[in-house]
Amino acid sequence: MSRILDTVPSSSNPGKTYDIIEGKDGVIYCTCTAWKMRKTCKHLKEWHQRNNLSGVSYVKDRPNSVDEVVSAEVQKLLCK
């Protein structure tokens, strides 16, 4: 089960917060749009710094779009 590690405030939208989540797969995620689009964001970077964590636990090379996911799956099938 995923668990919320922290809730961080938005710097550009007062009153809005984002959750830093550890997924079932062990990857650390942020619920902001930047993370969903680029697999990195300022909230997660700040969280790492604030907690003195070395390295990065999030995945930057995951597909960013449905087309990329489908393309990757098609490639797997063609290689079988």
Image (cartoon, rainbow, N blue to C red):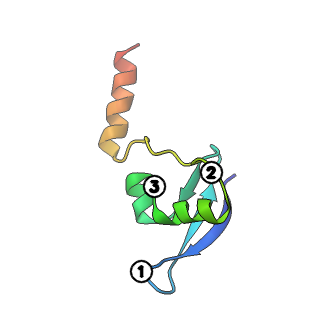
- When the figure is inspected, residue 76 is found, relative to residue 35, above or below; the finding is above
Q: Quadrant of residue 77?
A: top left
Residue at the limit of the structure toward the bottom, as seen here: 14
- Tell me residue 52's x, y (percent): 67, 59
Within-10-Å neighbours for mark 2: few <14, some 14–19, many 20+ = some
| Of callouts 1 and 3, the N-terminal one | 1
Q: Quadrant of residue 70?
A: top left
Q: Who's the residue at 30% across and 41% down the image?
A: 67
Can you say which quadrant of the picture contains the C terminus? top left
Q: Which residue carries the number 3 mark? A: 40
Front tag of 1 and 2: 1
SS for callout 1: loop
- When the figure is inspected, residue 44 is found, relative to residue 13, above or below; the finding is above
Q: Which residue carries the number 1 mark? A: 12
SS for callout 3: loop
| Of callouts 2 and 3, the N-terminal one | 2
- Tell me residue 40's x, y (percent): 45, 55
